[in-house]
Image (cartoon, rainbow, N blue to C red):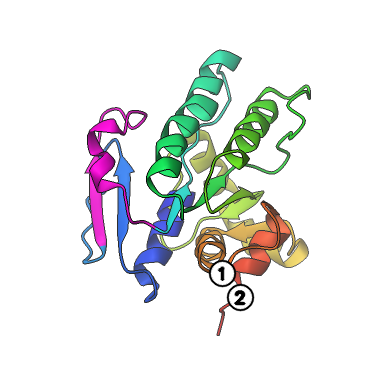
Amino acid sequence: MVGQGVLRECLLDPGVEAVRVVGRSPLNQKHEKLTELVMQDVGNLAPVYGELTGYDACFFPLGVSSGGMTESAYRKLTYDLTLAIARPLAELNPGMTFIYVSGAGTDSTEHGSVMWARIKGATENALLKLPFKAVYLFRPGIIQPLHGIRSKTKAYRLLYSLLGFLMPALRALFPRHVTTTEEVGRAMIEVARNGGPQPVMEIRDIIRQGRQNES
């Protein structure tokens, strides 16, 4: 869902020259700035290293819900996969800014009782050690999908369908706790372009950065 949001904002932003999407399935979307690399195993970028150089930023919104997953399975799809992609990108693009979409409540100590939070924390800590120009860790909370964007997670789609009509009210009541796919996407671009206040970007920071260039 976040990936759809940041892709939309990248294609709309006149300052973004080119966007390359790496994924397991085609987007079925055409745009003069957009190219795709469709790969069955996105955790092995070696065959396409030559096509992944010269980029200023990597927006990494890939993630799965931990519901019903064992710790080892969740770690494989969260920590292992993220680092398998980030490590070669850091070597190929030392001037790259890497923006990782984590989650509110992530445990930077890696020793808490919540499984997903520990593993997200371990992933964040490992990313910060890589030789990128900069790493930013986005921790959004409640995100309102806009412009027809839908989550690929069935449980989240159900939740949004039930709460969708309440989102404007929630944003009005809790403006520092609810953001949108549009704001998150714009915040990622803003931070990649001009830097952010600190590596860990909580929801209030995301909202602030996402509104930097509002008219």
Indicate the secondary structure of the residue bearing disc 1.
Answer: helix
Magenta segment: does it hold 53? yes
Say whether marks 1 and 2 touch (CB < 8 Å): yes
Q: Give residue 212's mark.
A: 2
Q: Is residue 193 left or right of residue 179?
A: left
Amino acid type of the residue tagged 1 in the rendering: Asn
Residue pictured at 73% horizontal, 25% vertical? 114
Magenta-colored span:
34-55
Q: Earlier in the sequence, mark 1 or mark 2?
A: 1
Quarter of the image for residue 128 reads: top right
Residue holding disc 1: 194
Q: Is residue 124 above or below residue 203?
A: above
Q: Percent position (x, y) of residue 182?
A: 51, 64
Q: Percent position (x, y) of residue 7?
A: 39, 58
Magenta segment: does it hold 51? yes
Q: Is residue 8 above or below residue 86?
A: below
Residue in front for this viewpoint, 76 or 132:
132
Indicate the secondary structure of the residue bearing disc 2.
Answer: loop
Pick the quarter of the image with the C terminus: bottom right
Can see residue 99? yes
Q: Percent position (x, y) of residue 88?
A: 40, 37
Residue pictured at 54% horizontal, 28% vertical? 79
Q: Is residue 163 left or right of residue 158?
A: right
Quarter of the image for residue 48 reads: top left
Can see residue 70? no
| Mark 2 surroundings within 10 Å by alpha-carbon count, few (fewer than 14), some (14 through 19), many (20 or more) | few
Amino acid type of the residue tagged 2 in the rendering: Gln
